[in-house]
Image (cartoon, rainbow, N blue to C red):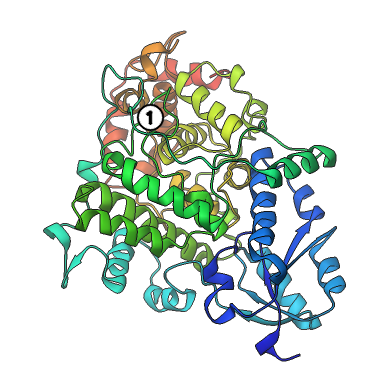
């Protein structure tokens, strides 16, 4: 058998036509469900459902072209298949090492470049050059130029690269939701029923609750989800992308991270659809630019920095954070949490395996940063508890962006804030037992008090950073600082 007619092995995050179409459209396809992979970590129940549903729907869509093997390990499947396969570069260091070992054994005939991102890994290496510190804005602008997205010749549309300032509105007052059309939700079918039955029979150690499938797992579903977002939700996306509403979990977000990370939606398809909406005057520039920046900028940036920073990146712990994850966090026990913002965020992960980026960064991440949770453990939790948390996604997002554990290689300052930010950007604080304005007392907000505790703990580091010098000076003027520090040292409930 030559490489020209070798079958193509697809991992569960490589299930779109960018992988098996085009020059590979003639190839037989191998799909594998490995029970050992499902048992390896304590995943969210709905995450396992999505992965198995995606694999089995891919088999149904590809028909006789595909073989789906259910084995204990991937190696068992390849031995059973008994033919060398082609495979595209997988999306984690561990999987890449595994594939390379299979290549040495002759079970993998060739490893091909990853086709599910806009920029190739080789092109990123060229862009990165000898950089030691990275700034997303530089990368994002280069991406816009390279792929000619939202450009008028050599200049950005509107003569501005970034519309962040227009995309930071708090939730509208006197509304409990944004009152937008609901996001696309796929209809479950017999395959989903079979997946649910099989997961029940496996009796796996999972977290979270089972629930209806909320996210697209096939190219057809992904196209429908994208179309609905572009038509009905994108126009309002930018204004409220950083806001949080207790009774509107999805708000105007696209919910496209799962199909993107499964490989059933290509990022350039989403980007081009958004740009068409702007060009046809169906969505404002600020909303379109904000959406495109998340995908062509941030998502691509996180992917490439995962590889660039290397497999030991999660060992970074500049802030010397060693607090274990509390049981209520690890087990998604939102009923044990009093703070409304934190309770809602944990409840969202429990019920859906998902919360939007501000809840991840400024509620969950902010809390973990203030309390000194161990960054590697936190990275593992985000990767297993979130339905879109594949292995490459979380290290740079958590270690670099959220926890500032890499010493500033990715972010210029720690993303810590007190209750005032959450009070401004959410509708939680009015119904909360804690007062965001108070740092001392039984009703002191754990974010407000925790912020000053964090600043004190890292005052020497923060005083050296011109973006955080002022907060240290402000802390030194607090007359009740010693009492706040004593209070927070004894705090075990949030």
Please identify the quarter of the rendering in which residue 77 is found: bottom right
The answer, for residue 290, to whether it is visible in the render is yes
- Residue extending farthest to the left is 159
Q: Is residue 42 left or right of residue 270?
A: right
Name the residue: 39% across, 23% down.
448
Residue 243 coordinates in the image, percent (x, y): 34, 32
Q: Between residue 487 and residue 249, name the one nearer to us.
A: 249
Quarter of the picture holding the N terminus: bottom right
Q: Is residue 413 left or right of residue 28?
A: left
Residue 467 coordinates in the image, percent (x, y): 28, 45
**Where 6 falls versus 460 (above or below)?**
below
Residue 21 coordinates in the image, percent (x, y): 55, 74
Residue 335 coordinates in the image, percent (x, y): 60, 17
Q: Between residue 417 and residue 347, name the one nearer to us.
A: 347
Please identify the quarter of the rendering in which residue 159 is found: bottom left
Name the residue: 45% across, 26% down.
450
**Where 183 falls versus 482 (above or below)?**
below
Please identify the quarter of the rendering in which residue 80 is found: bottom right
Q: Between residue 226 and residue 398, name the one nearer to us.
A: 226
Q: Which residue is mark 1?
A: 244
**Where 368 falls versus 305 (above or below)?**
above
Q: Is residue 461 left or right of residue 14?
A: left
Could you tell me which secondary element the residue under label 1 belongs to? Answer: loop
Tally the numbered discs. 1
Query: Is the residue marked by circle 1 packed among few (<14), some (14-19), or many (20+) residues within 10 Å?
Result: many
- Residue extending farthest to the bottom is 2
The answer, for residue 135, to whether it is visible in the render is no
Q: Between residue 228 and residue 340, name the one nearer to us.
A: 228
Name the residue: 39% across, 73% down.
128
Name the residue: 65% across, 35% down.
324
């Amino acid at each position: 058998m030559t490489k020209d007619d070798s079958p193509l092995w697809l991992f569960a995050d490589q299930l779109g036509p960018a992988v098996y179409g085009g020059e590979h459209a003639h190839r037989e396809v191998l799909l594998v469900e490995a029970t050992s992979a499902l048992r390896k970590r304590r995943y969210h129940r709905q995450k396992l459902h999505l992965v198995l549903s995606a694999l089995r729907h891919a088999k149904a869509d590809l028909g006789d072209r595909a073989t789906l093997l259910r084995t204990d390990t991937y190696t068992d499947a390849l031995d059973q298949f008994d033919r060398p396969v082609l495979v595209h570069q997988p999306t984690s260091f561990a999987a890449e090492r595994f594939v390379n070992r299979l290549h040495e054994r002759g079970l993998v005939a060739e490893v091909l470049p990853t086709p599910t991102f806009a920029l190739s890994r080789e092109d990123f290496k060229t862009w990165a050059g000898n950089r030691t510190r990275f700034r997303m804005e530089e990368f994002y602008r280069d991406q816009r130029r390279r792929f000619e997205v939202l450009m008028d010749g050599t200049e950005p549309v509107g003569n501005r690269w970034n519309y962040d300032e227009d995309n930071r509105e708090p939730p509208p007052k006197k509304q409990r939701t944004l009152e937008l059309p609901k996001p696309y939700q796929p209809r479950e079918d017999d395959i989903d029923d079979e997946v649910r039955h099989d997961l029940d029979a496996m009796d796996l150690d999972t977290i979270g609750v089972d629930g209806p499938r909320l996210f697209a797992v096939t190219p057809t579903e992904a196209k429908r989800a994208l179309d609905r977002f572009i038509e009905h939700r994108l126009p309002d996306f930018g204004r409220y992308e950083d806001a949080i509403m207790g009774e509107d979990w999805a708000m105007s977000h696209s919910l496209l991270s799962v199909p993107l990370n499964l490989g059933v939606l290509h990022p350039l398809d989403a980007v081009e659809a958004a740009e068409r909406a702007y060009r046809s005057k169906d969505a404002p520039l600020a909303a379109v630019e904000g959406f495109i920046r998340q995908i062509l900028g941030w998502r691509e940036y996180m992917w490439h920095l995962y590889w660039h920073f290397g497999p030991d990146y999660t060992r970074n712990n500049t802030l010397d954070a060693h607090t274990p994850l509390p049981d209520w966090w690890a087990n998604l026990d939102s009923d044990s949490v009093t703070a409304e913002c934190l309770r809602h965020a944990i409840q969202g992960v429990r019920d859906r395996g998902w919360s939007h980026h501000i809840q991840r960064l400024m509620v969950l991440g902010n809390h973990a940063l203030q309390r000194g949770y161990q960054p590697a453990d936190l990275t593992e939790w985000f990767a297993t508890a979130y339905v879109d948390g594949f292995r490459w996604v979380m290290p740079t997002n958590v270690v670099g962006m959220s926890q500032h554990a890499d010493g500033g290689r990715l972010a210029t300052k720690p993303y810590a804030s007190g209750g005032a930010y959450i009070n401004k950007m959410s509708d939680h604080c009015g119904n909360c037992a804690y007062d965001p304005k108070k740092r001392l007392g039984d009703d002191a907000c754990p974010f407000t008090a925790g912020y000053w505790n964090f600043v004190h703990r890292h005052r020497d580091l923060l005083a050296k950073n011109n973006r955080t010098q002022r907060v240290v000076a402000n802390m030194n003027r607090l007359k009740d600082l010693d009492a706040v520090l004593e209070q927070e040292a004894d705090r075990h409930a949030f």
